Amino acid sequence: MDERVISAQASADERQTESALRPTTLAEYIGQAQAKAQLGIFIAAAKGRAETLDHVLVQGPPGLGKTTLAYVIAREMNTNIRVTSGPALERPADMASILTGLGAGDVLFIDEIHRLPQAAEEVLYPAMEDKAIDLVIGKGVGARTHRLHLEPMTVIGATTRPGLISAPLRDRFGINLRLDFYPPEELAQVIERSARILNVPLDPQAVPLLATRSRGTPRIANRILRRLRDVAQVEGDGQVTVDLAERGLRLIGIDQGGLDEIDRRYLRVLASKFRGGPAGVETLAAALSEETETVEDVVEPYLMQRGLIERTPRGRQLTPAGRLEAGMEQSTGGLFGP
């Protein structure tokens, strides 16, 4: 799944490119107007009081710029940032080591914070609330607790699944931001900016085409741009024109609706094996030979955004538009009945 051109997950070899494309200020950050407006006020207020910014929880689908926003916050606050992820903090000592290494006002960014182990999470509670951690010294009856005070800092947590974050942890974030899928006109701005940075000759008339095929996600837009740059270099004169973009998109398997083969297979399986649904996500994932979390976080969000599927208490099912996309007839006596 991670090898999909339109996967919203970043591959290891493209993180360096993403870093080069990453905006450094709120003014450069395209889209997400509501989140930017809130942050602009909160950052200005914190700086005006010479205080650290309150802890920030950023939620939204992959590829929308949660990590970028953390770097922007650190830059706007004129401080350093330490980056880690929930799965990387396996032991309480891992969390304690990072917290004690932070300087005054530093930002700690925890990606996939919903996957933070409970033991590490409990170390984070007093750090966020009281600027301290409790260290247990010794073992058995002789063990004692020593409170170690920390420098003021800001924790930024990013999650694609806010429902999996425990209530005690969620309550410790004073600022909650949600990033939404980008409309085509804002994705067009992202594509034009990236093309300038990467020195990709881009026909302005091709920009809307790329924007509508990028699933509302800047990471996907940038990846498609890089792949079309390759096609233009090998099969054209280096410029990404409308005709070359159409040919390149067909080559990498993205149709006019922004769907790829995995999306189409999801719709076909739901149509043919489950009569359009409802079907449980675990059952669907097994039929697709994919992890349940991958189906929920990577495949389904865009299909829901397109109005092709819906999540119901009984499971996933095709909408009327999804039934048409999957080739099912809606009328009585059709392929699967009414």
Image: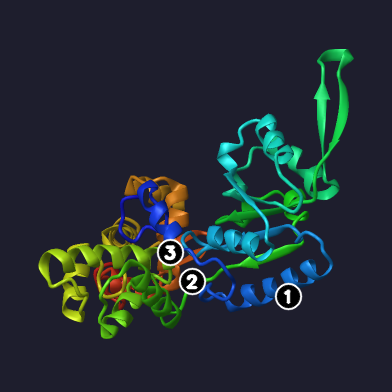
Horizontal side of residue 284 vs 241, given as left or right: right
* Disc 2 target residue: 181
Which of the pair 314/264 is nearer the observer? 264
Identify the amino acid type marked 3: Leu
In the structure shown, which secondary structural element does the residue marked by tag 3 occupy? helix
Give me the C-alpha separation between circle 1 and circle 2. 23 Å
Horizontal side of residue 13 vs 91, given as left or right: left
Residue at the spot x=42%, y=54% of the render?
Answer: 9
Q: Tag 2 or tag 1, which sits nearer the N-term?
A: 1
Q: Nearer the viewer, mark 3 or mark 1?
A: 3
- Please, which residue is most extreme toward the front here? 78
Residue 171, image x and y in percent? 77, 55
Residue 121, image x and y in percent? 71, 41
Q: Nearer the viewer, mark 2 or mark 3?
A: 3
Which of the pair 137/160 is nearer the observer? 137
Which of the pair 34/1 is nearer the observer? 34
Residue 66, image x and y in percent? 55, 61
The answer to whether mark 2 and mark 3 are in CB contact below 8 A is no
* Disc 1 target residue: 41
Identify the amino acid type marked 2: Phe
> Dot 3 surroundings within 10 Å: few (below 14), some, or many (20 or more)?
some
Residue 259 visible in image: no
Give me the C-alpha separation between circle 2 and circle 3. 19 Å
Horizontal side of residue 167 vs 140, given as left or right: left
Identify the amino acid type marked 1: Ile
* Disc 3 target residue: 21
Residue at the spot x=47%, y=49% of the render?
Answer: 293
Residue at the spot x=83%, y=14% of the render?
Answer: 140
> Dot 1 surroundings within 10 Å: few (below 14), some, or many (20 or more)?
few
In the structure shown, which secondary structural element does the residue marked by tag 1 occupy? helix
In the structure shown, which secondary structural element does the residue marked by tag 2 occupy? loop
Q: Nearer the viewer, mark 1 or mark 2?
A: 1
